[in-house]
Image (spheres, helix red, strand yellow):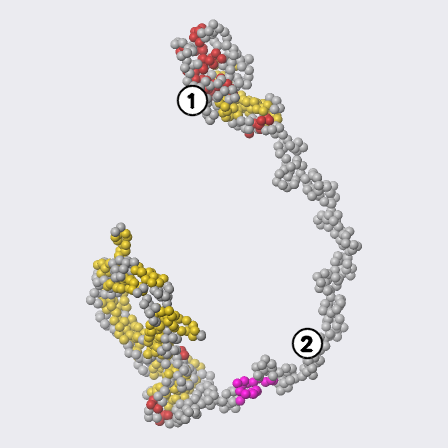
Amino acid sequence: MSSLYISRYTKKRIMFSRTKRGILTGLSALLFSCGGSPLERATIPKNDTAEESTNPTTDSTEERTDSYFISQLPFPGKQPHPRAESKEDIISYLPSFDTTENTSSDSSQDTESDKWVKVGDDHHQKWCPPETPVYVAGKCTTLEDVICTDSDKTEALFKKSAFGDYFEKTIANSDPSLGLGGTVTFSTLSDPTVQELSPDLCKSTQILEEYYCSEGIATTKAIKCNEYLPKSTCVVNEQGQGFCQPEDLCPTLPGIQPTLVYDNDKNGVAESCIEDLCQSIPEIQSSFLYDNDKDGIAESCELDLCSLIPGIQTSLIYDNNGDGVNDSCEALDVCLTIEGTQTDFLFDTDNDGKKDSCVPDYCPEQPGVQEDFPYDNDNDGILESCLLDLCPTIPGIQDTYSYDNDWNGVPESCEPIDVCPLIEGTQTVLLYDTDNDGINDSCTPDFCPELPGVQSALPYDNDQDGINESCIKDFCPDTLVPGIQSEFLYDVDKDGVKESCVPVDKDFCSDPDPQKTYPNATLYSYSDQWHMGFCLDGNGSSDTILHVICSEDGTWHTDITECKLDMPCVQGACAECSDSDGTNFDEKGYVLWLEKDGTIGSKKDYCLSSNENDYRTDFVCKGTTWDITFEACPTGQKCLEDIVDGKATLSCIPGIPPVCEDSDGTYNFESVGTTTGFTKEGDAYSHNDFCLSTISADTIIDFYCEGGISKSSYFWCDPTEICKEEIESVDGKVVGTLKCIPAPAKPTCEDFDGTENYPQKSYVSGMDKHGKSYTHNDYCVNGGQLQGIIDWKCNEYNIPQSNFYLCESNELCKEVPTTENDQTNTTLACIPSCIDLDPDNNPAIAGTVYDFNNVPYPDVCEGNILYQYECTPLTGEKMEAGIINCANGCDGGMCK
């Protein structure tokens, strides 16, 4: 290894010459790093001028042989910062020396030989010029040309010196590289192939000389291994590199074990160098104890007492001598008669949960263990039953007798007595409970339980066919009144006793004024015949009509019809309006009415709430349609719909005082205000003022408070204006306003059939004052109280307006073709309603339909086929209802 040297004389020249500071800094680390060899005495080249100028003393010619590492000299000024990372950082900390006291005025005339450095060792010495003051690998070079690498990457750091108030370069005792072993490689950039290697060395078993790179120069430091790691020693690895090796806690194991290896007690901390293979056995077992498989190699910690049984059996399994102690690996056969070894009993014959027998108990319900069936009930020589069959003639096993024929409460016979000999088969018990007490008491049913006694047969033959078929005597045969009439229906002679099946006398067909004679009936008169309709029960609550029909020969016959959709019969005709509760505000009822299109309309009574008062509404019949009446609740009360005793009711009950607050005051149309509060029902509300647009004009709706109630007022805009809500700033506040402003568009309107042209189906179209286009078509209105034509027209402001034409009460509005040959162009017309005398299409009734032109269309028979007609819903036109194949033939427009 090359060493760098410098004489003390030259060193002093460097320290006291301001121009030499840069050399001091660069060489300090370099010389320290290469200070491993003995110092060579360096002789300065002879130069009288230099000696006289630099050595004013009498011994100036004496050869200076003392040498020092420059890096070991204390810095006379401020110390290098411990975080300095480069030569430049260190240079910046060097002091500026004043040389006026130590040099003469001509000190700048130092000769060039004074600046040379003598470097080398005992075998080779060389002088290097100042521009290349480093001698490496046999040549002088610069510090910048030096390359230093450390294989174990020892980290250099600054540490305050123990010899003075300055910092020196060193390494930490805890540096991980001390336990690795490495080599410092020293070479130059100009010729990297020439290298000098400095491995870490062991000076003794305790001293490690660690080489490392500092400021690019190879440096060394002696380290005590005990200070790096207690109980460690310095050793050399296979590469000849020294390192501090920790104490081997397990010398019996391969390699160095700095810690114990095995955690045998499983507490998370290793405490042994030996693995305990049998932790269940006291002391550490480093090997298995037993060779259970007899292969010559121990593989188990436990002795297998039963090697023929899978798994390790550490104890014997079976207690063959019954002393309570297991004594064998093999069990005794407790059931020798059964194939295979049975180590335990197979069956639990006493159901105590423990097996106690080798054979099953064939009859567990009998005492003792039955190893076979005891009875041969079928007498085939083979026992097959646990029970003795007392009645072999009866299917199944009868282990008891079934019948108590002597009525002593104990069955004693296999065959019963027939209690109903008149009924086919043997009846062991009575079949019917005729008095409904839960006990059968008769062999025959009571055909008429509503009649006294047991009726074993029906008592009445009402149809006179020789076969009794009814429990009730029919006072009115089907030829007069269909169905069974248990009494006469009418008191014709007005003596207080009903004596007739029909409400007319024998001279009915010759009565000159039957409507006067029978005011509670309805007269139906046609061109060739007439008849009267009577409500079947005479009190108006039925939906069945009895028709008494006069023939051309002066005789009469009867027919029955049911009102459509359960509408009631009123004075011999199906009502067109029915009120369930009459005029009654306390009950929540309903009305039903027959629309002219053949459908049923309905309205239910209800509570009507408003800000000021609540109302009870009552729908009633008015003529053939409905009407509505109102009754106001007292001030401060509210209407309540409730169920009382199973009935729906409407009642007025006390409410709570209403509360109302108006944010913008009364009739303040221009401000968007809000009324808030609570109704008398306790419901919270909030009503905002707003713009309302209609076909005719726009209006401003302003809500205000009056008597604690929120009400609304209206301000109509001019027809040429619209209502608009805008946002404005008033007194620094953002508020909403409602204003009538000029319309953005001029309304247009065009009527394509002229004003009040009701028959012509047309339309109006145009653009409203908001700039939106519209189209309104003429149309029919049918339903409720109104039937008529809606015709649209344009008013003087070019705004669309509808007119209504009301049809007669017996008419419907209908869209019909303009001509018979033109089905595409249509008109709107009021035409007579269609009439159906048999709305239910009963095949037993000869019905007739009258169309809009009052042309009759009777039901027709063709052979056994019945053709029927009906009125179509909504349009009211005549149409075929369908055909029926009459099983007993068809005659007179009805099935026989």
Instruction: Report, in whole angstroms, how far the alpha carbon at label 2 lies from the one at label 1.
Output: 127 Å
Write the start and end of the magenta stretch as one range.
Answer: 442-459
The image's mark for residue 395 is 2
Judge whether residue 458 is colored magenta: yes
Quarter of the figure with residue 804: bottom left
The image's mark for residue 685 is none
Amino acid carrying mark 2 in the image: Pro
Amino acid carrying mark 1 in the image: Ser
Residue under label 1, please give it: 92
**Is residue 361 something one can see in this rendering?**
yes
Q: Is residue 166 left or right of 874 when viewed as pictured?
A: right
Q: Quadrant of the N terminus?
A: top right
Q: Is residue 746 left or right of 76 when viewed as pictured?
A: left
Residue neighbourhood size for the residue with mark 1, other residues' Cα within 10 Å, grouped as few (<14), some (14–19), many (≥20): some
Residue neighbourhood size for the residue with mark 2, other residues' Cα within 10 Å, grouped as few (<14), some (14–19), many (≥20): few
Q: Residue at x 45, y 13 (%)?
A: 13
Task: Establish if 477 lies above or below 127.
Answer: below
Single out the mark in the foreground, 2 or 1.
Answer: 1
Q: Residue at x 50, y 26 (%)?
A: 157
N-term mark: 2 or 1? 1
